[in-house]
Image: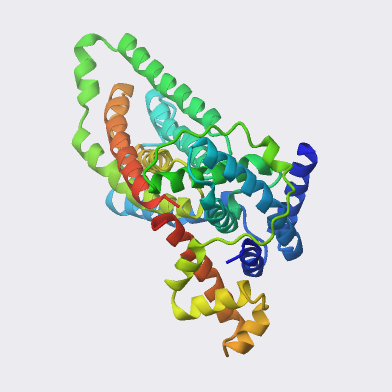
Amino acid sequence: MKTENLIHALTADQSGPTPPLARTLMRGLLPGVAVAVLLYLVILGSRPHLLAHFLEPRLLFKLIFPWAVGACALATVLRLAQPGADARRYGRLLLVLAVVLGAAVVTELIVVPPAHWKASWIGHNARFCLIVIPTLSFAPLIAALIVLRRGAPTNPVLAGAAAGLLAAAIGAGLYATHCPDDSPLFVACWYGLATLVVVIIGSIAGSKWLRW
Amino acid sequence: MREDGEREWGLFLQAANTGDALAYRRFLTVLAPALRQFIRRSLSRACAPETDAEDIVQEVLLAIHLKRQTWMSGSPVAPWVFTIARHKVIDFLRRRGRRVHLPLDDFSESIAAEVEEPNLIGADIDRHLDSLSTVQRKVVKSIAVTGVSIAETAADLSMSQGAVRVALHRGLAALATKFSTIG
Protein backbone atom coordinates (compact mmCIF):
# COMPACT_ATOMS: atom_id res chain seq x y z
CA MET A 1 0.00 0.00 0.00
CA LYS A 2 1.22 3.48 -0.80
CA THR A 3 1.76 5.86 2.09
CA GLU A 4 -0.61 8.39 0.58
CA ASN A 5 -3.32 5.72 0.54
CA LEU A 6 -2.75 5.09 4.21
CA ILE A 7 -3.02 8.82 4.89
CA HIS A 8 -6.34 8.79 3.09
CA ALA A 9 -7.63 6.02 5.35
CA LEU A 10 -6.33 7.77 8.49
CA THR A 11 -8.04 11.00 7.47
CA ALA A 12 -11.31 9.18 6.86
CA ASP A 13 -11.07 7.63 10.35
CA GLN A 14 -10.78 11.05 11.94
CA SER A 15 -14.28 11.86 13.08
CA GLY A 16 -14.98 14.60 15.55
CA PRO A 17 -12.72 16.22 18.13
CA THR A 18 -10.26 14.17 20.18
CA PRO A 19 -10.42 14.73 23.95
CA PRO A 20 -7.06 15.58 25.55
CA LEU A 21 -5.41 12.74 27.45
CA ALA A 22 -5.58 14.62 30.77
CA ARG A 23 -9.37 14.52 30.64
CA THR A 24 -9.37 10.85 29.64
CA LEU A 25 -7.06 10.11 32.57
CA MET A 26 -9.24 11.88 35.13
CA ARG A 27 -12.42 10.27 33.83
CA GLY A 28 -10.83 6.87 33.59
CA LEU A 29 -9.48 7.02 37.13
CA LEU A 30 -12.87 7.88 38.64
CA PRO A 31 -14.36 4.36 38.60
CA GLY A 32 -11.17 2.95 40.12
CA VAL A 33 -11.18 5.51 42.91
CA ALA A 34 -14.92 4.93 43.45
CA VAL A 35 -14.34 1.19 43.93
CA ALA A 36 -11.51 1.91 46.39
CA VAL A 37 -13.68 4.33 48.40
CA LEU A 38 -16.56 1.87 48.44
CA LEU A 39 -14.26 -0.92 49.58
CA TYR A 40 -12.89 1.38 52.28
CA LEU A 41 -16.38 2.26 53.51
CA VAL A 42 -17.47 -1.37 53.58
CA ILE A 43 -14.45 -3.05 55.16
CA LEU A 44 -12.75 -0.22 57.10
CA GLY A 45 -14.46 3.09 57.80
CA SER A 46 -12.69 5.88 59.63
CA ARG A 47 -11.24 5.34 63.09
CA PRO A 48 -13.16 6.80 66.07
CA HIS A 49 -12.58 10.45 67.03
CA LEU A 50 -10.61 11.12 63.84
CA LEU A 51 -11.73 14.72 63.59
CA ALA A 52 -11.10 15.45 67.28
CA HIS A 53 -7.40 14.64 66.82
CA PHE A 54 -7.16 16.11 63.35
CA LEU A 55 -4.68 18.82 64.26
CA GLU A 56 -2.29 16.47 66.02
CA PRO A 57 0.85 16.90 63.85
CA ARG A 58 1.61 13.20 63.35
CA LEU A 59 -1.95 12.42 62.29
CA LEU A 60 -2.14 15.48 60.08
CA PHE A 61 1.09 14.51 58.34
CA LYS A 62 -0.11 10.93 57.82
CA LEU A 63 -3.43 12.12 56.38
CA ILE A 64 -1.95 14.68 53.99
CA PHE A 65 1.30 13.09 52.83
CA PRO A 66 -0.21 10.28 50.69
CA TRP A 67 -2.34 12.77 48.75
CA ALA A 68 0.72 14.94 48.06
CA VAL A 69 2.45 11.86 46.66
CA GLY A 70 -0.71 10.99 44.73
CA ALA A 71 -0.96 14.43 43.12
CA CYS A 72 2.67 14.25 42.09
CA ALA A 73 2.31 10.70 40.76
CA LEU A 74 -0.77 11.73 38.77
CA ALA A 75 1.18 14.52 37.07
CA THR A 76 4.05 12.10 36.41
CA VAL A 77 1.77 9.45 34.92
CA LEU A 78 0.25 12.01 32.58
CA ARG A 79 3.70 13.18 31.40
CA LEU A 80 5.00 9.64 30.96
CA ALA A 81 2.01 8.80 28.76
CA GLN A 82 2.73 11.69 26.39
CA PRO A 83 5.74 11.33 24.08
CA GLY A 84 8.11 14.26 24.28
CA ALA A 85 6.61 15.58 27.55
CA ASP A 86 9.07 16.17 30.38
CA ALA A 87 8.28 14.07 33.45
CA ARG A 88 11.54 14.85 35.21
CA ARG A 89 10.20 17.90 37.03
CA TYR A 90 7.58 15.78 38.77
CA GLY A 91 10.11 13.03 39.36
CA ARG A 92 12.22 15.58 41.22
CA LEU A 93 9.16 16.69 43.18
CA LEU A 94 8.66 13.07 44.24
CA LEU A 95 12.26 13.02 45.46
CA VAL A 96 11.54 16.16 47.49
CA LEU A 97 8.57 14.36 49.07
CA ALA A 98 10.83 11.43 49.92
CA VAL A 99 13.17 13.87 51.65
CA VAL A 100 10.19 15.35 53.56
CA LEU A 101 9.27 11.85 54.74
CA GLY A 102 12.88 11.30 55.78
CA ALA A 103 12.82 14.59 57.71
CA ALA A 104 9.62 13.51 59.47
CA VAL A 105 11.30 10.25 60.49
CA VAL A 106 14.37 12.08 61.83
CA THR A 107 12.16 14.52 63.76
CA GLU A 108 10.29 11.61 65.30
CA LEU A 109 13.55 9.94 66.31
CA ILE A 110 14.63 13.18 68.02
CA VAL A 111 11.30 13.81 69.75
CA VAL A 112 10.58 10.25 70.90
CA PRO A 113 12.92 8.66 73.46
CA PRO A 114 14.79 5.62 72.04
CA ALA A 115 12.99 3.27 74.43
CA HIS A 116 9.73 3.96 72.54
CA TRP A 117 11.15 3.75 69.02
CA LYS A 118 10.31 0.12 68.57
CA ALA A 119 6.72 0.50 69.77
CA SER A 120 6.18 3.44 67.38
CA TRP A 121 7.72 1.54 64.49
CA ILE A 122 5.91 -1.80 64.98
CA GLY A 123 2.59 -0.13 65.86
CA HIS A 124 -0.62 -2.11 66.28
CA ASN A 125 -1.34 -3.71 62.96
CA ALA A 126 1.54 -3.53 60.53
CA ARG A 127 0.52 -6.72 58.74
CA PHE A 128 -3.02 -5.45 58.22
CA CYS A 129 -1.57 -2.26 56.73
CA LEU A 130 0.56 -4.30 54.33
CA ILE A 131 -2.51 -6.17 53.10
CA VAL A 132 -5.07 -3.36 53.07
CA ILE A 133 -3.12 -0.69 51.16
CA PRO A 134 -2.41 -2.94 48.14
CA THR A 135 -6.01 -4.20 48.27
CA LEU A 136 -7.42 -0.67 48.17
CA SER A 137 -4.92 0.20 45.42
CA PHE A 138 -6.00 -2.60 43.12
CA ALA A 139 -8.95 -0.91 41.39
CA PRO A 140 -7.17 2.46 40.95
CA LEU A 141 -4.17 0.61 39.49
CA ILE A 142 -6.31 -1.24 36.95
CA ALA A 143 -8.06 2.02 36.05
CA ALA A 144 -4.75 3.85 35.62
CA LEU A 145 -3.34 1.05 33.44
CA ILE A 146 -6.44 1.04 31.24
CA VAL A 147 -6.08 4.78 30.69
CA LEU A 148 -2.34 4.42 30.05
CA ARG A 149 -3.08 1.95 27.28
CA ARG A 150 -4.74 4.84 25.46
CA GLY A 151 -1.66 6.93 26.06
CA ALA A 152 1.70 6.38 24.44
CA PRO A 153 4.25 5.63 27.16
CA THR A 154 7.67 5.23 25.56
CA ASN A 155 8.89 3.65 28.80
CA PRO A 156 6.18 1.12 29.75
CA VAL A 157 7.95 -0.11 32.89
CA LEU A 158 8.38 3.38 34.32
CA ALA A 159 4.84 4.38 33.36
CA GLY A 160 3.50 1.24 35.07
CA ALA A 161 5.55 2.01 38.17
CA ALA A 162 4.19 5.58 38.28
CA ALA A 163 0.66 4.20 37.92
CA GLY A 164 1.45 1.88 40.84
CA LEU A 165 2.66 4.82 42.93
CA LEU A 166 -0.51 6.75 42.13
CA ALA A 167 -2.71 3.79 43.06
CA ALA A 168 -0.76 3.11 46.27
CA ALA A 169 -1.08 6.77 47.28
CA ILE A 170 -4.85 6.54 46.87
CA GLY A 171 -4.93 3.32 48.91
CA ALA A 172 -2.66 4.80 51.58
CA GLY A 173 -4.61 8.08 51.69
CA LEU A 174 -7.82 6.16 52.41
CA TYR A 175 -6.26 3.70 54.83
CA ALA A 176 -4.62 6.54 56.81
CA THR A 177 -8.03 7.60 58.14
CA HIS A 178 -8.59 4.12 59.57
CA CYS A 179 -5.10 3.23 60.78
CA PRO A 180 -4.47 3.85 64.51
CA ASP A 181 -0.68 4.24 64.14
CA ASP A 182 0.40 7.80 63.48
CA SER A 183 4.15 7.71 63.99
CA PRO A 184 6.20 8.66 60.92
CA LEU A 185 8.33 5.61 61.78
CA PHE A 186 5.29 3.41 61.15
CA VAL A 187 4.20 5.33 58.06
CA ALA A 188 7.64 5.37 56.43
CA CYS A 189 8.19 1.68 57.03
CA TRP A 190 4.86 -0.06 56.50
CA TYR A 191 3.11 2.38 54.20
CA GLY A 192 6.40 2.54 52.32
CA LEU A 193 6.62 -1.24 51.99
CA ALA A 194 3.00 -1.52 50.89
CA THR A 195 3.62 1.22 48.30
CA LEU A 196 6.72 -0.57 47.03
CA VAL A 197 4.68 -3.73 46.47
CA VAL A 198 2.11 -1.85 44.37
CA VAL A 199 4.84 0.00 42.44
CA ILE A 200 6.50 -3.32 41.56
CA ILE A 201 3.18 -4.83 40.48
CA GLY A 202 2.55 -1.70 38.39
CA SER A 203 5.92 -1.90 36.66
CA ILE A 204 5.47 -5.59 35.83
CA ALA A 205 1.96 -4.91 34.50
CA GLY A 206 3.39 -1.98 32.55
CA SER A 207 6.03 -4.11 30.87
CA LYS A 208 3.31 -6.53 29.75
CA TRP A 209 0.35 -4.30 28.90
CA LEU A 210 1.68 -0.87 28.06
CA ARG A 211 3.70 -1.67 24.94
CA TRP A 212 2.32 -0.18 21.74
CA MET B 1 12.50 27.18 7.96
CA ARG B 2 12.48 24.88 10.90
CA GLU B 3 10.43 27.12 13.15
CA ASP B 4 7.93 27.87 10.42
CA GLY B 5 7.53 24.18 9.74
CA GLU B 6 6.98 23.43 13.37
CA ARG B 7 4.45 26.20 13.84
CA GLU B 8 2.59 24.98 10.77
CA TRP B 9 2.44 21.45 12.18
CA GLY B 10 1.06 22.81 15.45
CA LEU B 11 -1.67 24.77 13.70
CA PHE B 12 -2.65 21.81 11.54
CA LEU B 13 -2.76 19.39 14.43
CA GLN B 14 -4.66 21.83 16.63
CA ALA B 15 -7.28 22.22 13.93
CA ALA B 16 -7.29 18.49 13.26
CA ASN B 17 -7.92 17.66 16.92
CA THR B 18 -11.01 19.84 16.89
CA GLY B 19 -12.34 17.75 14.02
CA ASP B 20 -11.02 19.53 10.91
CA ALA B 21 -10.41 16.65 8.48
CA LEU B 22 -8.76 18.80 5.81
CA ALA B 23 -6.23 20.18 8.29
CA TYR B 24 -5.55 16.64 9.45
CA ARG B 25 -4.89 15.44 5.95
CA ARG B 26 -2.48 18.29 5.32
CA PHE B 27 -0.76 17.61 8.62
CA LEU B 28 -0.15 13.95 7.75
CA THR B 29 0.90 14.86 4.22
CA VAL B 30 3.60 17.31 5.33
CA LEU B 31 4.59 14.97 8.13
CA ALA B 32 5.31 11.95 5.90
CA PRO B 33 8.45 13.28 4.13
CA ALA B 34 9.88 14.54 7.43
CA LEU B 35 9.31 11.15 9.02
CA ARG B 36 10.80 9.41 5.99
CA GLN B 37 13.98 11.43 6.25
CA PHE B 38 14.26 10.98 10.00
CA ILE B 39 13.68 7.24 9.77
CA ARG B 40 16.12 6.75 6.90
CA ARG B 41 18.82 8.55 8.79
CA SER B 42 18.08 6.62 11.97
CA LEU B 43 18.32 3.35 10.06
CA SER B 44 21.57 4.30 8.41
CA ARG B 45 23.04 5.32 11.76
CA ALA B 46 22.06 1.92 13.12
CA CYS B 47 23.65 0.30 10.04
CA ALA B 48 20.27 -1.21 9.13
CA PRO B 49 19.01 -1.37 5.54
CA GLU B 50 17.01 1.69 4.50
CA THR B 51 14.71 -0.48 2.42
CA ASP B 52 12.50 -0.94 5.49
CA ALA B 53 12.04 2.80 5.91
CA GLU B 54 8.62 3.05 4.28
CA ASP B 55 7.21 0.27 6.46
CA ILE B 56 8.29 2.21 9.53
CA VAL B 57 6.93 5.48 8.11
CA GLN B 58 3.55 3.78 7.78
CA GLU B 59 3.75 2.26 11.24
CA VAL B 60 4.60 5.67 12.73
CA LEU B 61 1.74 7.36 10.84
CA LEU B 62 -0.64 4.76 12.25
CA ALA B 63 0.73 5.27 15.76
CA ILE B 64 0.50 9.05 15.48
CA HIS B 65 -3.07 8.69 14.29
CA LEU B 66 -4.16 6.34 17.06
CA LYS B 67 -2.28 8.23 19.78
CA ARG B 68 -3.02 11.76 18.63
CA GLN B 69 -4.76 12.61 21.89
CA THR B 70 -1.37 12.32 23.63
CA TRP B 71 -0.19 15.55 22.02
CA MET B 72 -0.69 18.37 24.49
CA SER B 73 -2.46 21.13 22.63
CA GLY B 74 -0.18 24.14 22.34
CA SER B 75 3.07 22.28 23.03
CA PRO B 76 5.65 21.86 20.24
CA VAL B 77 4.68 19.10 17.80
CA ALA B 78 8.16 18.06 16.65
CA PRO B 79 9.37 16.54 19.95
CA TRP B 80 6.12 14.59 20.18
CA VAL B 81 6.31 13.33 16.59
CA PHE B 82 9.96 12.37 16.67
CA THR B 83 9.77 10.74 20.09
CA ILE B 84 7.09 8.46 18.63
CA ALA B 85 9.17 7.89 15.47
CA ARG B 86 12.28 7.09 17.49
CA HIS B 87 10.30 4.72 19.71
CA LYS B 88 9.04 2.88 16.64
CA VAL B 89 12.47 2.72 14.96
CA ILE B 90 13.99 1.25 18.12
CA ASP B 91 11.07 -1.16 18.39
CA PHE B 92 11.52 -2.18 14.76
CA LEU B 93 15.24 -2.81 15.16
CA ARG B 94 14.65 -4.71 18.40
CA ARG B 95 12.19 -7.01 16.64
CA ARG B 96 14.98 -7.72 14.20
CA GLY B 97 17.29 -8.56 17.03
CA ARG B 98 19.30 -5.36 17.17
CA ARG B 99 19.89 -3.26 20.19
CA VAL B 100 20.55 0.36 19.47
CA HIS B 101 20.90 3.68 21.13
CA LEU B 102 19.35 6.51 19.13
CA PRO B 103 19.81 10.02 20.43
CA LEU B 104 16.89 12.35 19.77
CA ASP B 105 18.86 15.50 19.11
CA ASP B 106 18.91 15.53 15.35
CA PHE B 107 15.35 15.90 14.16
CA SER B 108 15.64 19.59 13.31
CA GLU B 109 16.72 18.99 9.73
CA SER B 110 13.97 16.46 9.14
CA ILE B 111 11.27 19.04 9.76
CA ALA B 112 12.33 20.97 6.68
CA ALA B 113 12.29 17.89 4.46
CA GLU B 114 10.04 18.63 1.53
CA VAL B 115 11.13 16.07 -1.00
CA GLU B 116 7.90 14.77 -2.44
CA GLU B 117 7.95 11.04 -3.04
CA PRO B 118 4.27 10.24 -3.13
CA ASN B 119 4.45 6.76 -4.58
CA LEU B 120 6.44 4.93 -1.96
CA ILE B 121 5.04 1.55 -1.11
CA GLY B 122 5.14 -0.31 2.17
CA ALA B 123 5.10 -4.09 2.00
CA ASP B 124 4.33 -4.97 5.62
CA ILE B 125 0.99 -3.22 5.69
CA ASP B 126 -0.39 -5.40 2.87
CA ARG B 127 0.72 -8.51 4.69
CA HIS B 128 -0.98 -7.27 7.87
CA LEU B 129 -4.10 -6.28 5.94
CA ASP B 130 -4.51 -9.89 4.86
CA SER B 131 -4.72 -10.99 8.46
CA LEU B 132 -7.62 -8.66 9.33
CA SER B 133 -11.22 -9.84 9.45
CA THR B 134 -12.94 -9.84 6.06
CA VAL B 135 -15.12 -6.81 6.79
CA GLN B 136 -12.27 -4.75 8.21
CA ARG B 137 -10.02 -5.65 5.29
CA LYS B 138 -12.65 -4.74 2.72
CA VAL B 139 -13.42 -1.43 4.40
CA VAL B 140 -9.79 -0.39 4.89
CA LYS B 141 -8.87 -1.39 1.35
CA SER B 142 -11.88 0.32 -0.15
CA ILE B 143 -11.13 3.61 1.61
CA ALA B 144 -7.34 3.51 1.44
CA VAL B 145 -6.47 1.82 -1.82
CA THR B 146 -9.36 2.81 -4.03
CA GLY B 147 -9.75 6.16 -2.27
CA VAL B 148 -13.50 5.85 -1.93
CA SER B 149 -15.36 7.82 0.75
CA ILE B 150 -17.08 6.35 3.79
CA ALA B 151 -20.50 6.92 2.25
CA GLU B 152 -19.55 5.17 -1.01
CA THR B 153 -17.93 2.31 0.86
CA ALA B 154 -21.10 1.88 2.91
CA ALA B 155 -23.17 1.72 -0.29
CA ASP B 156 -20.72 -0.68 -2.01
CA LEU B 157 -20.62 -3.12 0.90
CA SER B 158 -24.29 -2.63 1.88
CA MET B 159 -23.30 -1.53 5.36
CA SER B 160 -24.40 1.48 7.41
CA GLN B 161 -21.98 4.41 7.52
CA GLY B 162 -21.63 3.91 11.25
CA ALA B 163 -20.61 0.28 10.74
CA VAL B 164 -18.06 1.35 8.12
CA ARG B 165 -16.57 3.90 10.54
CA VAL B 166 -16.31 1.30 13.29
CA ALA B 167 -14.77 -1.29 10.95
CA LEU B 168 -12.29 1.28 9.63
CA HIS B 169 -11.22 2.36 13.10
CA ARG B 170 -10.92 -1.19 14.41
CA GLY B 171 -9.11 -2.26 11.27
CA LEU B 172 -6.53 0.52 11.64
CA ALA B 173 -6.07 -0.27 15.35
CA ALA B 174 -5.60 -3.94 14.46
CA LEU B 175 -3.02 -3.00 11.81
CA ALA B 176 -1.07 -1.00 14.40
CA THR B 177 -1.10 -4.01 16.73
CA LYS B 178 0.12 -6.31 13.93
CA PHE B 179 2.99 -3.93 13.22
CA SER B 180 4.12 -3.83 16.84
CA THR B 181 3.71 -7.53 17.59
CA ILE B 182 4.62 -9.30 14.36
CA GLY B 183 6.86 -6.72 12.73
| Residue found at x 72% / y 65% | B21
Instruction: Quadrant for residue B142, please give it.
Output: bottom right
Towards the viewer: A104 or B122: B122
Q: Is residue A149 left or right of residue B144?
A: left
Colouring rule applied to residues: rainbow
Q: Residue at x 33, y 23 (%)?
A: A184
**Relative to the observer, which residue lies in front, A45 or A3?**
A3
Q: Is residue B138 above or below residue A99?
A: below
- Please determine whether, in this image, residue A167 is positioned above or below residue A5: above
Q: Residue at x 66, y 42 (%)?
A: B78
Q: Is residue A34 above or below residue B109?
A: below
Residue B53, position as x, y percentages in the image:
55, 50
In this rendering, is residue A192 above or below A46?
above
In front: A145, or B132?
A: B132
Residue A67 or residue A49, whichever sits in front = A67
The image position of residue A34, as x and y in percent, is 42, 55
Is A47 placed left or right of B27 in the picture? left
Give how far across and how far down residue A26 sits, in percent: 53, 51
The x and y percentages for residue A81 are: 51, 45
Can residue A108 be seen?
Answer: yes
Can residue B75 be seen in this snapshot? no
Q: Quadrant of residue B2?
A: top right
Name the quadrant of the N terminus of chain A.
bottom right
Q: Could you tell me how many numbered marks the image carries?
A: 0
